[in-house]
């Protein structure tokens, strides 16, 4: 019999400012909006120039619906909607992915659209998901990659306990400039 995966269970994690919960169909518009946002496109390395980042319209197409409808069936990763408790609306997502069972390690990603940023939600969401990863999932190490032109995200990660492991030099070309990526990780005893 295959070993059951702790990632198969999709929790709801309650914070003061934000609730992390499994995706619902009502979140599709909000995710399309967040992913068309120029800051999100640039800072997640999804585009390679300012020209590509600006003027995008949010698109809720079949691919987006299929992707978010399938998130709750994944047994090797955790994708949760970041909900703003002030409005009850989804403003972004938080993801634990690239799980290696043998090493008890995984990756971390977060994105919050313009409606949710700079109000503390990202900090709280990061802490909530780290707590879940280390207590409920029994992970030993959670890692991420952040571009050097994203000091806000790096600050949020450091506040939550991540430290820098090293640099991947010139990982991204943006507007014909080379941007380093900062590799960070956190272990259970380091969470803040
Ligand atoms: C990165 C992100 C998740 C942070 O979430 P958030 O809700 O906006 O952040 P918070 O409000 O919780 O905290 C922001 C912190 O950064 C600080 N900050 C803001 N701009 C900053 C800057 N340019 N340099 C350093 N720190 C900065 C704020 O002062 C605050 O810190 P404090 O609480 O110690 O004062 C969110 O902004 C986001 O998703 N951005 C777009 C996509 C992205 O960057 N994703 C991450 C890719 S690795």
Image (cartoon, rainbow, N blue to C red):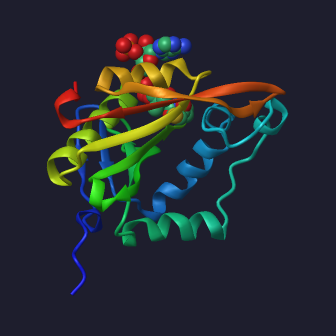
Against 178, residue 103 (above or below) is: below
Q: Quadrant of the C terminus?
A: top left
- 172 or 116, which lies in front? 172
Residue 127 in the image: x percent, y percent?
27, 34
Residue 61 image point, x, y percent: 67, 65
Residue 94 makes an appearance in the image: yes
Quadrant in which residue 168 is drawn: top right
Front position in the image: 26 or 125: 125
Residue 118 showing in the rendered view? no
Q: Residue at x 24, y 57 (%)?
A: 11
Residue 72 lies, with reference to residue 1, above or below; the image says above
Residue at 43% x, 18% y is: 155
In the depicted structure, whether residue 147 falls above or below residue 67: above
Give the residue displayed 62% in from the left and 21% down from the top.
149
Q: Nearer the viewer, residue 103 or 44?
A: 103
Q: Left or right: where does residue 44 sit relative to residue 125?
A: right
Q: Where is residue 184 shown, x and y percent of the image?
A: 42, 31
Looking at the figure, which quarter contains the N terminus? bottom left
């Amino acid at each position: 019999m295959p070993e059951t995966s702790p990632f198969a269970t999709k929790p709801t994690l309650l914070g003061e400012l934000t609730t992390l919960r499994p995706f619902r169909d009502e979140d599709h518009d909000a995710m399309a909006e967040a992913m068309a946002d120029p800051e999100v496109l640039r800072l997640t390395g999804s585009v390679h120039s300012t020209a590509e980042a600006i003027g995008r319209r949010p698109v809720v197409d079949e691919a987006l619906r299929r992707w978010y409808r399938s998130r709750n069936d994944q047994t090797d990763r955790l994708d949760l909607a970041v909900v703003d408790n002030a409005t009850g609306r989804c403003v972004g997502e938080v993801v634990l992915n690239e799980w290696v069972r043998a090493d008890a390690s995984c990756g971390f990603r977060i994105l919050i659209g313009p409606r949710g940023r700079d109000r503390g939600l990202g900090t709280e969401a990061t802490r909530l998901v780290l707590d879940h990863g280390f207590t409920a999932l029994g992970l030993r190490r959670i890692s991420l990659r952040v571009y050097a032109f994203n000091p806000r995200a790096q600050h949020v990660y450091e506040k939550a306990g991540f430290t820098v492991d090293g640099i991947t030099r010139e990982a991204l070309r943006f507007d014909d400039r080379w941007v380093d990526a900062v590799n960070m990780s956190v272990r259970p005893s380091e969470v803040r």
